[in-house]
Structure formats: C-alpha cells, structure tokens
Amino acid sequence: MNARLENDLINLYDDNEILIGSLKIKSNFKESELVLNNQTFKLIRDGWKTKIIEDSIEKFNLKTNSLLGNTEVLETGHKITGEWGIKWATKLIDDKENTLLKIRNENSFLDNGKYEI
C-alpha cells in the first residue's frame, strides 16, 4: 500500500494502484473526514480528545498525551505512537505493544508526498 497527497486529500492506494480511501483534513484540524470502502467517518477534535463518528453514531474516542503526542483509542487500548531513528515512522500498536501498522515517508529526508505502509 502507499499514500499520496493529492488535491488536499491523503489518498491510500493498494499495490495495484486502486484507491482504498482518503483523508481530508481541514486547516484548523478540528474536523477531518476519513473515507474507507464507501464508509465516511468524521473525526472531531476538542483539545486533546477526538471523537470518531459514523452516520451520527459515536464509534471511538481518542485521547492524546499532551507531553509525548501519543494517542490512545480508549475503547480498545490501541495506541498511535512514533518510532524514532533514521527511518522514523508512525505506528499503531495494540494494548500489548505489538506493532499492527507502520506508516513512514518514502524519503527519510524530504516529504515527497509518498508514504510506505
């Protein structure tokens, strides 16, 4: 999979270059929209907390640690955290610290709008 910034959307493609989903972030970062397989989720941020809503139903609540920036999905214990080093990344880990998903920029030094997943 890979992701590209195109027309103010972060588009996610599979290995056959078929569009899987998109992420639209407004400039104030208070409300975003995630589209996956014809499902639309709204992400509404209020300070260090974010609600994920689908069809007016609250699905998940996220809480960000103000010091480290790590985010926890309160209902599952999963966390979104950073990985530091030459090939830094953002990763999703479960409540037992197992890496479930890792996303990083294709180029470690410049943001070329392409990401490895």
Image: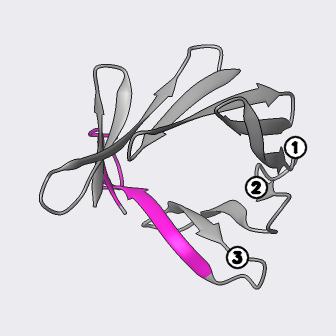
Label 2: few (<14), some (14–19) or many (≥20) C-alpha neighbours in 10 Å: some
Q: Earlier in the sequence, mark 2 or mark 3?
A: 2
In the displayed structure, does residue 6 sit left or right of residue 32? left
The residue located at (72%, 82%) in the rendering is 97
Which segment is the magenta one? 99-116
The residue located at (78%, 57%) in the rendering is 73
Badge 2 amino acid: Asn
The C terminus - image quarter: bottom left
The N terminus - image quarter: bottom left
Badge 3 amino acid: Asp
On residue 70, which mark appears? 2
Q: CA distance from mark 2 to mark 3?
A: 13 Å
Q: Earlier in the sequence, mark 3 or mark 1?
A: 1
Where is residue 83? Give x, y as percent.
Answer: 59, 67
Q: Nearer the viewer, mark 2 or mark 3?
A: 3
Q: Residue 103 in magenta?
A: yes
